[in-house]
Amino acid sequence: MSITPPFTEASARQKVQIAEDLWNTRDPQKVAKAYTEDCVWRNRNEFLQGHTEIEAFLTRKWQKEVDYKLKKELFIFSGEKIAVQFEYVWHDHNGQWFRSYGLEHWEFADDGRMKKRTASINDVLTEPK
């Protein structure tokens, strides 16, 4: 059963947990299915549209961000929109660890898939976990 808008606090929290769990699979094809075919993204300084670009982006991301582990938290919601704050840890191929923080704004289609995602992210060097 898909969680569809308009969201309540409970359904918004469920949607956030589902997204966190899905992203932590690090499976670009599986993650892309949660978005509409024409979904529009802004991720840092990259602008993407559609499953093909999303899958390619996520493939590059998780090749670079080794041992990626994400935590999302509901920030606010209204109607078909949800905003989350998040942080994740990862390391590069040289063993340097990072903690990345940010905010995402999501807009959903009637069927519950995301049609727009805007993410602002900052990376901080950190010690090994």
Image: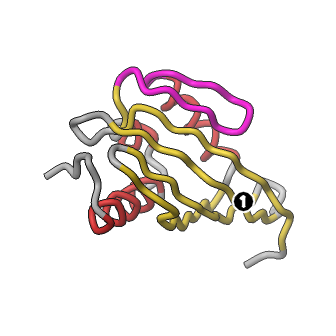
| Residue that numbered label 1 is attached to | 100
Could you tell whether 59 is left or right of 14 in the image? Answer: right
Q: Is residue 27 above or below residue 17?
A: above
Which residue does the image show at 84% across and 57% down from the upper left?
94
Q: Which residues are magenta?
A: 37-52
Element type at mark 1: strand
In the image as oriented, which residue stretches furthest toward the left? 1
Q: Is residue 91 above or below residue 79?
A: below
At a point 44% along the width and 22% down the height, the residue shown is 50
In the image, 100 versus 83, the foreground residue is: 83
* Residue 115, horizontal then vertical, whole percent: 40, 32
Q: Where does residue 36 sit, x and y in percent of width and height? A: 34, 29
Residue nearer the viewer, 83 or 50: 83
Residue appearing at x 30%, y 34% in the figure: 109
Q: Is residue 26 magenta?
A: no
User: Within 10 angstroms of label 1, few (less than 14), some, or many (20 or more) residues?
Assistant: some
Q: Residue furthest front?
A: 78
Q: Give x and y (percent) for residue 63.
A: 64, 44
> In the figure, residue 44 lies in which quadrant?
top right
Res 95 → quadrant: bottom right
- Judged by its main secondary structure, the magenta piece is strand
